[in-house]
Amino acid sequence: MAGFRQHVPAHADITMVAHPSVTLLVDLSDSECLVYDAHRQRGRGSVLIGLLPGDLRTGGPVGECLQIRLEPVAAAAVLGASNELSGTVVALEDFWGRDAGRAEETLRAAGSWDERFAIAAEFLGRRLGTHPPVDPEVAHTWRRIRAGRGLMRVDGLADEVGWSRKRLSARSRSQLGITPKRVARLVRFDHAAHLLAAGHPAAGVAAESGYADQSHLHREVRAFAGLTPAAVAVAPWLAIDHVAWPSSSPTRRRACDGKTEAVDQYPLLAQAPRGVAPPEVDSTSAGSNGNPGPC
């Protein structure tokens, strides 16, 4: 999780970069200030963003916003296993009904970001167990691909879980909304995007991320983000990642200009069993070292 606060009343316009997670953006402004534009349709307010959302931009004069990222296995446990987890951009109210509005009101009234993080964790935790879990084989495959930074062979993963490649692909698509092969491409792109954001040159990123050459990297970045590698390197969508955006990063300072900060971060353990208290908050003040926080 991350909390964002806009210091200057200015209109923001951010291109969202694909990420291997399902994302919830909760608008905590006094009115629906968050605007999102996807698939040539525009919406306002809190939004649920599935995997591979395509061409997506957000913006508006947003005062405060809570961002929550859920890995697909956790998202399926909270939201339900569905192929709609891929390509979905939908108003949170349309997905959760009145519960979304009640959650927004409670979060908006909270006195601190720590309190908001705890409320959000409890809200999501109540939904664990309300949907059938994904198959252990599918969850194992996802974890292995993530750990291997997208360089795992699908045939080998199918052998590990004792399934055919066809069955593994079908079950993964039905439960996570994405096939293992597509997962590997997304995870490989995500690793490359983080290296680019950390300031590494494109040629070195291509080699370290497993691409055939720099042109291959360029094509994949275009396919997933609709941007060039240089544009991805300064994309605020990655800004809450302390690996991609260390406090000393000159890229972060250029991108944000001090107008917006990620005021706190909270490592959400979305799959903790019911009845277990939320993990201790690991809060960091993004602007406390004299550098403007990420936007």
Image (cartoon, rainbow, N blue to C red):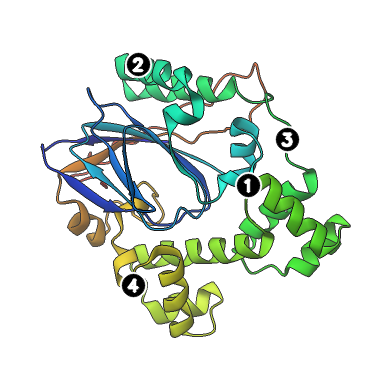
- The answer to whether residue 202 is left or right of residue 183 is left
Where's residue 87, x and y in %?
Answer: 51, 51
| Residue drawn at (35%, 52%) of the image | 237
The numbered dot on residue 30 is: none
Q: What residue type is labelled 2?
A: Glu
Q: What element carries label 1?
A: helix
> Would you name the residue on which mark 1 appears?
83
Which sits earlier in the primary sequence, circle 2 or circle 3? 2
> Would you name the residue on which mark 4 appears?
228
Discs 1/4, front: 1
Q: What element carries label 4?
A: loop
Residue nearest the viewer, comparing 285 with 191: 191
How far apart are the two marked residues, 4 and 2, measured between alpha carbons? 39 Å
How far apart are the two marked residues, 2 and 1, measured between alpha carbons? 30 Å
Q: Which amino acid does label 3 sit on?
A: Pro
Where's residue 223, x and y in %?
Answer: 45, 69
Discs 3/1, front: 1
Q: Is mark 2 in CB contact (under 8 Å) with mark 1? A: no
| Residue drawn at (32%, 65%) of the image | 233
| Residue drawn at (54%, 84%) of the image | 212
Which sits earlier in the primary sequence, circle 4 or circle 2? 2
Q: Is mark 2 on a helix, strand or loop?
A: helix
Which quadrant would residue 283 be assigned to in this image?
top left
Q: Is mark 3 in CB contact (under 8 Å) with mark 1? A: no
> Crowding near pointer 4: few (<14 within 10 Å), some, many (20+)?
some
Q: What residue type is labelled 4?
A: Thr
